[in-house]
Image (cartoon, grey):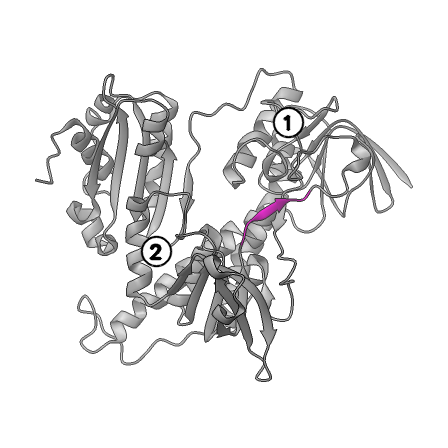
Amino acid sequence: MKNKKCKVLVVGAGPGGYVAAIRSAQLGMDTVIIEGERAGGTCLIRGCIPSKALIHAAHKFHDLAKHAKEGGHMGISIPGPAELKMAQLKGWKDDIVDRLNKGVEHLLKTSGAELITGWAEFKDAKTVIVGDIQIEAENVILANGSVPIELPFMKYGDGVISSREALDIDEKLDHLVVVGGGYIGLELGITHKMLGADVTIVEAMDSVLPIFDKELRRPLELFMKKNKIKVNTGVFAKGVEKLDSGRLKLNFIDKDNSDDETKMQSVEADRVLVTVGRRPRSEGLASTGVALDERGFVKVNDKCQTNMKGVYAIGDVANLGEMLAHVASFQGEMVAEIIAGHNRAYNPVAVPAIVFTEPEVVSVGLSPQEAKDAGHPVITGKFPLAANGRSLTQEAEKTGGFVRVVAREDDHRILGVQAVGTHVSELVGEWTLALEMGALLEDIAGTIHAHPTMTEMTHEAVLATLGHAIHIA
């Protein structure tokens, strides 16, 4: 057994872990990072990045289908239907992932952090065994991440897949059934619909994306209806049967009649994608002595410190903040600086959330109802994509989207911004910065926004909140 000692040991090279390791090394601390698979973690290797690559390709394919119709589109026509080769699409997606993976490895190396590949086995809170190496650390950062939740009556395998397998499909599907109408299920479901598959959504709640209000969901629901995505809400999935044809049959039942077997419904599919959430990857931490909550998350304070001195937890495995890549990265940088002696704490004013469906849904800060529930005197303003020149030139207005601003009526402090529409995710940086800086409506109204851009909608939505929008009556 080889023995190694270091100042900082990071377990997991996802968006939280690799950022923590790079920042630790930048600060002059001897840093080792362990990764069981590939540097980049779930987000880069089997989540955010590959899914966005497929979403982009799906848009391209969908647009080509318009040009192939009789008469073409925008004056552009092609002689026949576009051909989709899923194996080549998967290869293109994998190339992007490979480039980014190598980029992360290069960044770790150039920063001075040492990357060790293998699965970490904890001997105690600050001693880890990886293969034939034993590592003792002064400080440990747990960045174990999360994994898809598996339904006990619908185990993964034999056509029942998680988001991980959904990103590696190399054949065109005829029919995909998605169990779970949250952001992962809808992103992947709409992607496969745009790639030519029939798609059925099965959701136990009374609506898809229940974390967003009805006004924000409406354009997305209309898009799914228009594009013939079958949505079943208020139903429980009950299990999958393998048919002689090789296809799968998913059984589901209305939750109000779940005890009446005669009310059982079913749908056939090539694959059943289960997206009912994610759980922290916290198994194997018993020997560390770190405390877990009832859901399996590592308990931490606002500095990501656990109950064990010198042991921290960040990102999806910790019970602080949303399970989002950008939260993990922020906490990773923060913890590295805390170990180096800086005064940092996790206390963001707002964390942006984005659903990369078509149309995209974005929210940062408080919704109108959340602001009212918090006791704020609320005013709101809305500006439609259909009134924005840049949106029209990109056909972004066809989804019926809008930008909505929420502010206090008395002092005009901006409390939140939400939007739904094509390409609106790229606008969220300004909104998050405005909230972090405590911006007033007048701060945005007095800022010149470039024309023609979609960012003008932020300016116009603020003017609408103040009661004098220029480009809507």
Q: Is mark 1 on a helix, strand or loop?
A: loop
Q: Is mark 2 on a helix, strand or loop?
A: loop
Q: Residue most toward the right? A: 1
Residue hosting label 1: 300
Please state the horizontal and vertical placement of residue 220, each as a whole percent of the image.
32, 54
Please state the horizontal and vertical placement of residue 288, each as a whole percent of the image.
79, 33
Vertical placement of residue 84 versus 135, above or below: below
- The structure residue drawn at horizontal position 33% and vertical position 31%, both measured from the top left corner, is 416
Q: Few, some or many C-alpha atoms within 10 Å of disc 2 (few <14, some 14-19, many ≥20)?
A: many
Vertical placement of residue 231 versus 173, above or below: above
- The structure residue drawn at horizontal position 22% and vertical position 56%, both measured from the top left corner, is 398
Q: Quadrant of residue 442?
A: top left
Left or right, 339 with reference to 351 = right
Please state the horizontal and vertical placement of residue 369, each as a whole percent of the image.
32, 33
Q: Few, some or many C-alpha atoms within 10 Å of disc 1 (few <14, some 14-19, many ≥20)?
A: many
CA–CA distance between discs 2 and 1? 36 Å
Q: Give the range drawn in magenta.
A: 276-281
Look at the image and tell me whether residue 430 can be seen. no
Disc 1 residue type (three-letter) = Val
Q: How many labels does the image show?
A: 2
Disc 2 residue type (three-letter) = Glu
The mark lying in front, picked from 2 and 1, is: 1
Residue hosting label 2: 358
Vertical placement of residue 310 versus 227, above or below: above
